[in-house]
Image (tube, rainbow, N blue to C red):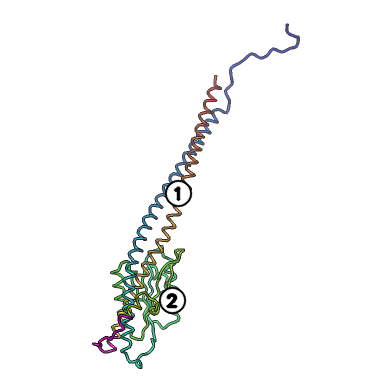
Amino acid sequence: MERAGARAPPAPGPARRPEGGCRDSAGAAASGEDHVKAVRALEERLKAWRSFRDVAHATRSLAAAQVLRWNAQVAHTRRQLAWSQAFHERVQRWEDRHRRRPPATCAVLALGTDLGLCGRLNRLVADAALQVVEEQQVVLFAACGARLLDLLPDDVPRLEEPAPSSMAAAVELAERVEAEVGDAGLRTRLCIVSATGVSRGGSPQVETSWDVGSDLAGLAEARAALARPLAQFAPADVAHTRARSLLAHARILHAACEGARAEASVRLARMTRAHESAERRIAEQERVLRKARQEGITQEMLEVLSQRHIAAMAP
């Protein structure tokens, strides 16, 4: 018997569907689309970095092959330079010492490059060459390389030459410049400004050369070979002119080969760094992409569980 004033429990009615169910489904769908777009953007970025790595790898391989090729040419021209210097020293003994006069003027040869990757090399060569122009009485200024020419002031008269990209081009350059130096006269001293190598960090090293160094490899052997008596079949002045031309040609050719090797070495160092940087970015992008994909899988699983829960709550 029920007590007076007691309320009976309400009769069970139909289960009420959560009001936010539709909104949650729509929000989940929008979130899923955004996640798919983000994953695709990461995939495109990873694809771009892989393409850049492939280009850097190909350029690095080409630069490495060119360094090896120019190494052989530098060794060959170094031997030629050693013999030309030894022959020039020997011929000078025939010349009357009283007729010798110190050089009064100079000819400057600046060896640059046409490549945009070697901008620092061209700037160093341009600065060193312009310093010589300011300090010396220059009667001939020859500049090699279109990008080097862009760095030189317009008021500096110069002989414009293309940067040699092969041994044949280097030989032709040496012949043309040597002829110009010969026309300038015997009292004109040749100054060569060029890159001679690269540092450990990949920066170009530029030197201003006036003469052949006594520590040149092969010079001692060439001097010893020419120490024996030689027959003089031409007047001393003719022999001296010819020996001077041979030496100038050998110096220009050797400097051109060294400059080309330095240019290839700079490109090799830069492309190696670019390749290593691309490898690091690719590894980073792959980690981010894996994480994004895992988050996408987790999000899909949560959406499935949410839909099942909503379905279970439905009447």
Looking at this rendering, what residue extends furthest in the bottom direction?
98
Which picture quadrant has residue 227? bottom left
Q: From the viewer's perspective, is residue 146 above or below residue 185?
A: above
Q: Residues within 10 Å of mark 2 (few under 14, many from 20)?
A: some
Quarter holding the N terminus is: top right
Q: Residues within 10 Å of mark 1 (few under 14, many from 20)?
A: some
Residue 39 in the image: state x and y as whole percent.
Answer: 46, 41
Amino acid at dot 1: Ile
Which picture quadrant has residue 276? bottom left
The residue nearer to you, when weighing 6 against 287, is 287
Q: From the viewer's perspective, is residue 170 above or below residue 58?
A: below
Q: Which mark is residue 135?
A: none
Quarter holding the C terminus is: top right
Looking at this rendering, what residue extends furthest in the top direction?
1
- Please tell me how many numbered marks the rendered image carries: 2
Residue 269 in the image: state x and y as whole percent.
Answer: 42, 61
From the viewer's perspective, is 289 left or right of 7? left
Looking at this rendering, what residue extends furthest in the right direction?
4
Identify the residue shown where x is 41% and y is 47%.
Answer: 47
Comes first in the chain, label 1 or label 2: 2
Residue indicated by mark 1: 282
> Is 249 inside the magenta-drawn segment?
no
Which-is-in-front pick, marks 1 and 2? 1
Start-end of magenta stretch: 223-239
Residue indicated by mark 2: 130
Q: Secondary structure at mark 1?
A: helix
